[in-house]
């Protein structure tokens, strides 16, 4: 049994010797978890990549002059999709692991640390978050960048995504507190022209906003004016802090005003009324759940709203949210949601003859891949190993100590695996992690930058 091709320096050299647009890669002998409803799981299958796209999936493929990667003993899956992360905060990781509530987070981070961030701090935090995402198998990350104090802050966040090679979604919003240039949202026009003029690139743009004016005032709250602005630019909208009675009332207003659609993503969605959920389902609005954030920080009901979403036909994406208090990886999100929902379902029927409706490992992997892509407006691009989509994929070792023997591939990915089992990550057909290491990163230099940025942020007086 050969599980060494994605640890071989010689194979990596072969891959990198060829120009990306002329590169052909044939993965052979893998268990392929396609997450495509029509293709399912393929045992001992092959997958062909040409340029940046998947061109064939199935048994015994012919690769011609392709570089052959023997993936026997490995699982191929789509890369995970993070539907919402505040990436700029990464150098403050776990600085408040036992935060009590949303107010504690807001006052320490958004009203405190955020106010002293320089553009270089935005760059360092965002780059660190994106590289960590790649390391743990997240190939697409929506960066809800809500500390855009100046044009330079926005530029730094976008350039950090670009420089890591991640499939990045820059969701731009002005800051909650402190001094800033008030260039948002108008500056999105310049950003579009400067960074997002092509439809065929790794980075895409969305408008980021809040559900209501309770936290940061009316300028940052979603409504008809911001919806028109996003529509004129042809970009989607991601709405954060969607929870409770006030957000439920806002959702009904948005539905009445015609500004809910599949291009609108509501984040968290905890503690909403049945009427709000009905409106979301009827308009095809997408939802990004943050399982550990909702439960750990205690947002409204503190229960990730997966049952509520499914009841109106919404299959949600999953997100990391804030690394100041939470884990950085998608494995944790999948497991937390899987356990919480199943506990809730069984508990609801305890002592009765009611049969609990429990989600499955397939469900949460679907949320973390295909549904995350749909939530980010990228369902046609990534999220499944479907011919025609971009080659965003993971090679997960199924014969490692913590995974062998392979009995159920989806169960192994969701419940057994972690970042150490990901021997390779490809984004747009380009190897970004190999032999268990993220490529093209000077780790000592990065470590120095991260520590210096953290010290500056922590030791600079806030306004």
Image: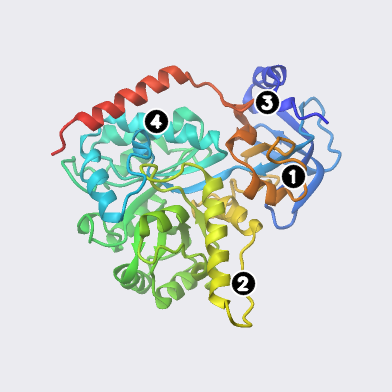
Q: Position of residue 183 (x, y in %)?
A: 22, 42
Circle 1 or circle 2, nearest the eye? 2
Gap between marks 4 and 1 measured at Cα: 33 Å
Q: Which residue is mark 4?
A: 159
The secondary element bearing badge 1 is classed as: strand
C-alpha separation, residue under disc 1 versus residue under disc 3 = 24 Å
Q: Report the residue that reaches farthest toward the right.
A: 60
Location of the C terminus (image quadrant): top left
Q: CA distance from mark 1 to mark 2?
A: 28 Å
Residue under label 2: 357
Q: Viewer-nearest of labels 1 and 3?
A: 1
Q: Is residue 164 above or below residue 378?
A: above
Q: Dot 2 surroundings within 10 Å: few (below 14), some, or many (20 or more)?
A: some
Task: Name which of mark 1 and mark 2 comes first in the sequence.
Answer: 1
The answer to whether marks 3 and 4 mark residues whose Cβ atoms lie closer than 8 Å is no
Q: Which numbered dot is residue 32?
A: 1
**Mark 4 or 1, nearer chain start:** 1
């Amino acid at each position: 049994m050969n599980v060494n091709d994605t640890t071989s320096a010689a194979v990596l050299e072969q891959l990198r010797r060829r120009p990306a647009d002329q590169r052909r890669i044939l993965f052979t002998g893998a268990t392929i978890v396609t997450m495509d409803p029509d293709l399912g799981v393929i045992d001992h299958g092959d997958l062909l990549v040409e340029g940046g796209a998947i061109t064939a999936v199935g048994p015994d493929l012919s690769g011609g002059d392709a570089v052959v990667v023997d993936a026997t003993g490995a699982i191929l899956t789509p890369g995970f999709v993070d539907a919402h992360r505040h990436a700029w905060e990464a150098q403050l990781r776990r600085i408040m692991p036992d935060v009590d509530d949303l107010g504690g987070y807001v006052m320490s981070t958004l009203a405190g640390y955020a106010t002293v961030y320089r553009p270089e701090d935005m760059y360092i935090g965002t780059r660190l978050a994106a590289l960590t995402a790649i390391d743990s198998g997240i190939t697409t990350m929506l960066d809800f960048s809500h500390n855009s104090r100046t044009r330079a802050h926005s530029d730094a966040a976008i350039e950090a995504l670009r420089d890591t090679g991640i499939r990045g979604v820059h969701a731009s919003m002005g800051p909650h507190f402190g001094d800033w240039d008030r260039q948002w949202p108008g500056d999105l026009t310049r950003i579009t022209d400067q960074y997002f003029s092509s439809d065929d690139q790794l980075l895409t743009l969305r408008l980021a906003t809040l559900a209501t004016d309770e936290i940061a005032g009316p300028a940052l709250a979603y409504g008809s004016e911001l919806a028109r602005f996003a529509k004129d630019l042809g970009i989607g909208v991601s709405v954060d802090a969607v929870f409770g009675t006030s957000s439920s009332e806002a959702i009904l207003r948005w539905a009445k005003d015609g500004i809910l659609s599949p291009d609108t993503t509501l984040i968290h969605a905890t503690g909403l009324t049945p009427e709000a959920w009905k409106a979301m389902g009827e308009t095809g609005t997408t939802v990004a759940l943050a399982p550990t954030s909702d439960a750990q920080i205690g947002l409204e009901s503190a229960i990730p709203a997966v049952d509520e979403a499914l009841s109106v036909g919404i299959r949600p994406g999953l997100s990391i949210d804030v690394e100041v208090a939470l884990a950085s990886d998608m494995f944790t999100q999948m497991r937390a949601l899987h356990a919480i929902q199943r506990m809730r379902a069984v508990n609801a029927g305890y002592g009765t003859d009611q049969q609990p409706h429990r989600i499955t490992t397939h469900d949460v992997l679907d949320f973390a891949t295909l549904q995350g892509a749909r939530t980010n407006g990228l369902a046609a691009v990534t999220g499944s190993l479907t011919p025609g989509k971009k080659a965003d994929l993971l090679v997960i070792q199924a014969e490692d100590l913590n995974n062998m023997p392979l009995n159920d591939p989806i169960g192994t990915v969701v419940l057994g695996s972690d970042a150490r089992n990901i021997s390779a990550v490809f984004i747009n057909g380009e190897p970004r992690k190999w032999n268990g290491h993220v490529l093209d990163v000077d780790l000592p230099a990065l470590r120095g930058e991260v520590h210096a940025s953290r010290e500056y942020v922590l030791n600079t007086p806030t306004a």
